Amino acid sequence: MKKTTLDNEEQTLLDALEQGEYESVMTPERKAMLEAAASQTFKKDKRINIRISQHDLMAIQSRAQREGIPYQTLVSSIIHKYLSGALRDVSTQP
């Protein structure tokens, strides 16, 4: 496991937290709201069917196997990243 190195400010905050200088102000209502929002964000309640080439399907399945995830999860992740702006076509970038 990779050890994380903290800068001085981060270490000061961590030390203060561990010494009990900070206290959570999370209310049960806020926690319930955040849990509901998180649940809705990752809810997979719709199915789609698409037609792709055998070559592309094999490439997706191969990549998913290397990542250790189901290929449908990889496809869903790619779509989500593209729609959220985290994935861009670099061939169209200047």
Image (cartoon, rainbow, N blue to C red):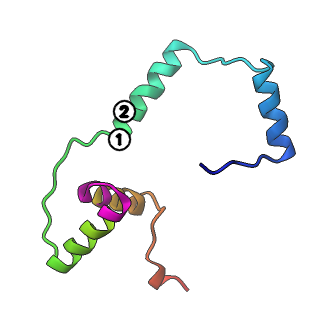
Q: Image quadrant of residue 75? A: bottom left
Q: Position of residue 42 (x, y in %)?
A: 35, 41
The part of the chain drawn in magenta is: 65-74
Quadrant of the image occupied by residue 45: top left
Main SS class of the magenta portion in the image: helix
* Residue indicated by mark 1: 42
Q: Residue at x 44, y 57 (%)?
A: 84
The number of numbered badges drawn on the structure is 2
Q: Quadrant of the C terminus?
A: bottom right
- Residue that carries the numbered disc 2 in the rendered image: 39
Q: Is residue 87 above or below residue 15?
A: below
Q: Are marks 2 and 1 in contact (CB under 8 Å)?
A: yes
Q: Is residue 52 above or below residue 2?
A: below
Q: Residue 60's x, y, as percent?
A: 27, 69
Could you classify mark 2 by the number of other residues whose Cα lies within 10 Å: few (under 14), some (14-19), or many (20 or more)? few
Q: Residues within 10 Å of mark 1 (few under 14, many from 20)?
A: few
Q: Quadrant of residue 64?
A: bottom left
Q: Amino acid at mark 2?
A: Ser
Q: What's the residue type where badge 1 is placed?
A: Phe
CA gap between label 2 and label 1 equals 6 Å
